[in-house]
Structures are given as structure tokens and as C-alpha cells.
Amino acid sequence: MIGHLYSVVIDCPDPDELANFYEKLLSLSRQPDTGEFVVLKNAAGSPVVLFQRVDDYRAPRWTESEHPQQMHLDVMVADLDEAEAQVLALGATLLEGSDKPIGYRVYQDPVGHPFCLITPEGAGG
């Protein structure tokens, strides 16, 4: 095992507005936020769905490749270096500017979808 799913991050033009929708839809509660990034957590207090502001946001359109779905997975790991070696061996690619020694690093899967490896320090917990 490399890690476990920590959260799903959804790009959007207004994190507060979209979080309001999912807060009600999924019966989740909101953590304090900055407005640029909103976190909804489950009853145990774990982050589940996160919303991040994206400038010049273009909404996805079902079945249209010009407007693909826009979200990524956060995978909680104990050790970034160890987990990185494992995901690279599986075919992932470290994305430029993601050489953080602690916290998180951003990769893409073999077909280009982004995902992050994060540690408790990177998640604020």
C-alpha cells in the first residue's frame, strides 16, 4: 500500500458557493476557510471534498474533451520520498515545481490526470 484517499479536490470559480451546494447535498460540514479554498468534512472531522478557486474557470461539459472534468485526488502518505518512488514506478510523473520536501507533491497519472501525495503536515493535521 502506498497511501489512502484523503480527499477529492474540485476546481471552481467560487469555492464558497459550490461548497454550500455540496454541504447540503452530502450532509457535510464546513471547516474555517479563506474563500480561495473551502473544505467540507465528515462527522469524524476528516476532510472529504475540497473546493479551490480557479481563475478563468471553464465549466466541464459532459462528453466534450475541450472542457474536461476538473478535479484531482489527494492521497495521504506517511513518507513523500518513499511514496514518490512507488508512484513513479507505477508510471506517474512528478510535475514541475512539485519538489516539496514535506507537505505535498503533485504528479500526473500515466494518462495525464493530476493527483497529489500529501502528508499530515501538508494537510494541516
Image (tube, helix red, strand yellow):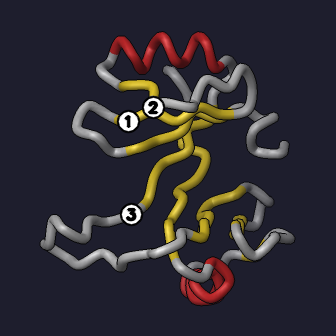
Q: Distance between the Cα atoms at labels 2 and 1?
A: 7 Å
- As rendered, which of 65 and 79 lies closer to the eye? 65
Of the two numbered discs 3 and 1 on the same chain, state the one appearing first in sequence.
3
Residue 119 rendering spot, x and y as whole percentages: 71, 31
In which quadrant of the rendered view does residue 100 lie? top right
Residues packed near mark 3 inside 10 Å, few (<14), some (14 to 19) or many (20 plus): some
Q: Write the residue at 52% across / 57% down.
A: 8
Of the two numbered discs 3 and 2 on the same chain, state the one appearing first in sequence.
3
Q: Is 1 displayed left or right of 77 in the figure?
A: left
Q: Distance between the Cα atoms at labels 3 and 1?
A: 13 Å
Query: Can the viewer see residue 27?
Result: no
- As rendered, which of 95 and 40 lies closer to the eye? 95
- Tag 2: residue type? Leu
Mark 3 or 2: the one toward you: 2
Question: What is the secondary structure assignment of the residue under circle 2?
Answer: loop
In which quadrant of the rendered view does residue 22 lie? bottom right
Which residue bears the numbered disc 3? 70
- Tag 3: residue type? Gln
Q: Quadrant of the C terminus?
A: top right
Which residue bears the numbered disc 1? 108
Residue 101 rendering spot, x and y as whole percentages: 71, 20
Residue 51 rendering spot, x and y as whole percentages: 60, 68
Mark 2 or 1: the one toward you: 2
Q: Is 107 displayed left or right of 4 in the figure?
A: left
Which residue bears the numbered disc 2? 95
The answer to whether the residues at label 3 and label 1 have Cβ atoms under 8 Å apart is: no
Q: Is 20 displayed left or right of 54 in the figure?
A: right
Query: Can the viewer see residue 87?
Result: yes
- Tag 1: residue type? Gln
